[in-house]
Image (cartoon, rainbow, N blue to C red):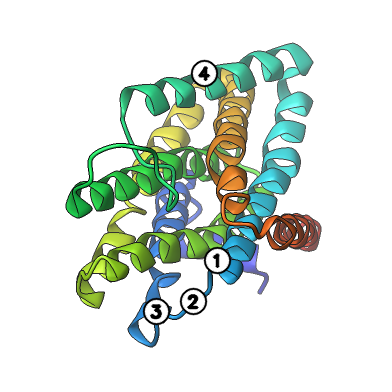
């Protein structure tokens, strides 16, 4: 039995249920990525930048192969361009309306450790939204192989993000259990966005290319505005860049292997 057959059987062939289960798994992966803090907090910034670069590479490849190409095939170039711009603008507005720290480096602001920790959690949660939306829309498109590749890729790239949430909290003297709990909590946005995405495109099929492109634009915004700048903020640009390349290759391989 192939993975596609197994997942389809598990969810009784219901694409909405597939979207819910898929995004629950990707959101859960955010917390799984934070599990190393139970063993050690001595994870170097060099390693963290490489892992975040890997996450960026996975998202770039997922955006290209699993979202933009299917959107063009289904709706043509102009709806895809329009949907992509709308997705980027939507994330830019959220970025502006919800004040948050850009991952670990942060912005100048209140000195309260607790406030900085909350801003960090908001940052990760905010940028998990387009990922959940992408997986939900992918299952709504009823192309299970592409959706599974996207689900696995987003789950992989969520792991270093969970670690990026938990490590600073532990360094701020939070308990490891509480830091782990908040890492899991930061992934909650994914199933919420995923349910919205899969129901929207399942009920209104003409929205499908727009939904795929919208998710792609939102993810591109996150990669450029949040993740890549973070990997270049502590002097480990080369590690971050190679992480991007490896992540892109892994996603490209997954996309091909699951076809």
Residue occupied by mark 3: 41
C-alpha gap between disc 3 and disc 4: 37 Å
Tell me whether the residue at label 1 lies in contact with that at label 4, contact meaning CB atoms closer than 8 angstroms. no
Mark 1 and mark 4: Cα distance apart in space: 29 Å
Residue appearing at x 46%, y 47% in the figure: 19
Marks 4, 2: nearer the viewer = 2
- Crowding near the residue tagged with mark 3, few <14, some 14–19, many ≥20 C-alpha atoms within 10 Å: some
Q: Are marks 1 and 2 in contact (CB under 8 Å)?
A: yes
Residue 145 appears anywhere in the view: no
Q: Is residue 17 left or right of residue 229?
A: left
| Element marked by disc 4 | helix
- The Cα–Cα distance between marks 2 and 3, rounded to whole angstroms, is 6 Å
| Up/down of 116 relative to 44, above or below | above
Contact (CB < 8 A) between labels 2 and 3? Answer: yes
Decide which of 76, 116 is in the foreground and name it.
Answer: 116
Q: Secondary structure at mark 3?
A: loop
The earlier-in-sequence mark between 3 and 4 is 3
Residue neighbourhood size for the residue with mark 4, other residues' Cα within 10 Å, grouped as few (<14), some (14–19), many (≥20): some
Residue found at x 31% / y 50%: 121
Per the image, the residue denoted by label 1 is 48
Q: CA distance from mark 4 to mark 2?
A: 35 Å
Estimate the spatial distance between the alpha carbons at disc 1 and disc 2, rounded to whole Å: 7 Å
Labelled pair 1, 3 in contact (Cβ < 8 Å): no
Q: 45 or 89: nearer the eye?
A: 45
- Name which of mark 4 and mark 2 comes first in the sequence: 2
Residue 242, image x and y in percent? 76, 61
Q: Which mark is residue 43?
A: 2
> In the image, which disc is placed on residue 89?
4
Reply above or below: 102 against 84: below
Most extreme residue toward the bottom, as rendered?
A: 39
Quarter of the N terminus within the rendering:
bottom right
């Amino acid at each position: 039995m192939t993975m596609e057959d197994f997942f389809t059987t598990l969810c009784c062939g219901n694409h909405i249920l597939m979207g819910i289960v898929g995004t629950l798994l990707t959101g859960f992966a955010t917390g799984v990525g934070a599990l190393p803090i139970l063993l050690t907090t001595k994870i170097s910034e060099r390693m963290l930048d490489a892992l975040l670069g890997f996450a960026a590479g996975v998202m770039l490849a997922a955006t290209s192969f699993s979202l933009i190409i299917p959107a063009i095939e289904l709706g043509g170039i102009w709806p895809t361009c329009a949907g992509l711009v709308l997705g980027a603008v939507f994330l830019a507005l959220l970025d502006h309306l919800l004040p948050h720290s850009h991952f670990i480096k942060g912005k100048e602001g209140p000195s309260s450790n607790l406030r900085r920790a909350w801003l960090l959690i908001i940052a990760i949660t905010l940028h998990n939204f387009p990922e959940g939306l992408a997986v939900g829309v992918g299952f709504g498109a009823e192309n299970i192989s592409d959706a599974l590749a996207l689900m696995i890729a987003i789950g992989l790239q969520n792991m270093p993000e969970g670690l990026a949430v938990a490590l600073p909290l532990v360094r701020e003297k939070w308990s490891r259990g509480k830091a782990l709990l908040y890492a899991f909590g930061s992934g909650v946005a994914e199933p919420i966005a995923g349910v919205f995405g899969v129901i929207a495109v399942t009920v209104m099929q003409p929205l499908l290319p727009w939904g795929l492109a919208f998710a792609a634009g939102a993810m591109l915004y996150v990669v450029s505005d949040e993740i890549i700048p973070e990997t270049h903020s502590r002097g480990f640009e080369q590690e971050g860049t190679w992480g991007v390349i490896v992540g892109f290759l892994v996603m490209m391989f997954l996309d091909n292997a699951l076809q």
